[in-house]
Image (cartoon, helix red, strand yellow):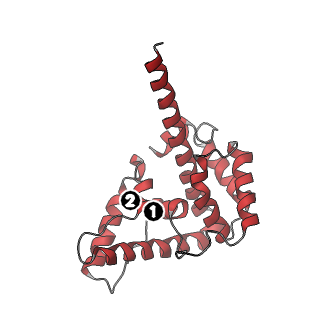
């Protein structure tokens, strides 16, 4: 194999691995949002934070077209979550028409998972990302025990882990959700199969 082809193959494998890591985090968030003991706590908090983010982006637009919040853009990269953009656009358009009414529709599961995975969950600027640093360390250990060591790229999902700690989710519950996400993806966290499960 020529050197350029080897580099291209290596790059392709790394891109696929990273998409798999992202997909595993998103699928785990969805599993936690569907969990009977957790959904009553996580879903309303994620929905409220989503409404706040949409309201803030609509207000920043000053009557123009509201930008889509970053957490929705990140999750909508997966074809199975493309509907997130249309929901966000409709919600933002509704906010621009009637800001006093706010976002009235319940965000779909994918939007809630995106908020939990990439969003602020209502944390204000200047506030620590997590209230219990011991919990965050335990969440990183749970991720590592289930999916292997959290590398530099995987650390981008510490926002998910912090949001889970702040919502009172136990590390064991994260492990269960990661196992569920990996089981639907050929048993591997961060695999090509994980990315395909969300694609």
Q: Position of residue 74 (x, y in %)?
A: 44, 54
Is residue 191 positioned above or below 110 on the image?
Answer: above
Q: Residue at x 30, y 68 (%)?
A: 90
Question: Which of the two residues, 198 or 36, is positioned nearer the viewer here?
Answer: 198
In this rendering, would 183 be left or right of 195?
right
Q: Residue at x 64, y 48 (%)?
A: 180
Question: Which of the two residues, 94 or 108, is positioned nearer the viewer here?
Answer: 94
What number is the disc on residue 35? none
- Residue 37 appears in view: no
Question: Which of the two residues, 105 or 52, is positioned nearer the viewer here?
Answer: 52
Residue under numbered circle 1: 111
Q: Residue at x 61, y 46 (%)?
A: 152
In this rendering, would 83 be left or right of 164?
left
Residue under numbered circle 2: 84
Q: Are marks 2 and 1 in contact (CB under 8 Å)?
A: yes
In this rendering, would 154 be left or right of 50?
right
Q: Position of residue 98 (x, y in %)?
A: 28, 83
Q: Quadrant of residue 93?
A: bottom left
Q: Residues within 10 Å of mark 1 (few under 14, many from 20)?
A: many
Q: Residue furthest bottom?
A: 100
């Amino acid at each position: 194999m020529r050197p350029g082809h080897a580099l291209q193959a290596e790059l392709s494998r790394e891109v696929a691995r990273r998409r798999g890591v992202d997909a595993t985090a998103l699928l785990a968030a969805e599993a936690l949002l569907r969990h009977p003991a957790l959904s009553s706590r996580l879903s309303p908090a994620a929905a409220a934070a989503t409404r706040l983010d949409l309201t803030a982006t609509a207000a920043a637009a000053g009557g123009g077209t509201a930008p889509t919040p970053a957490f929705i853009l990140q999750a909508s990269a997966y074809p199975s979550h493309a509907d997130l953009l249309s929901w966000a656009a409709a919600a933002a358009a509704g906010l621009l028409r009637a800001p006093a009414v706010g976002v009235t529709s319940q965000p779909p599961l994918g939007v809630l998972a995106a908020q939990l995975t990439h969003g602020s969950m209502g944390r204000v600027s200047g506030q620590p990302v997590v209230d219990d640093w011991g919990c965050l360390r335990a969440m990183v250990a749970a991720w590592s025990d289930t999916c292997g060591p959290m590398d530099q790229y995987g650390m981008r999902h510490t926002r998910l882990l912090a949001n889970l700690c702040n919502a009172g989710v136990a590390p064991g519950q994260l492990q269960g959700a990661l196992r569920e996400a990996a089981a639907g993806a050929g048993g591997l966290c961060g695999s090509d199969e994980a990315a395909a499960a969300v694609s």
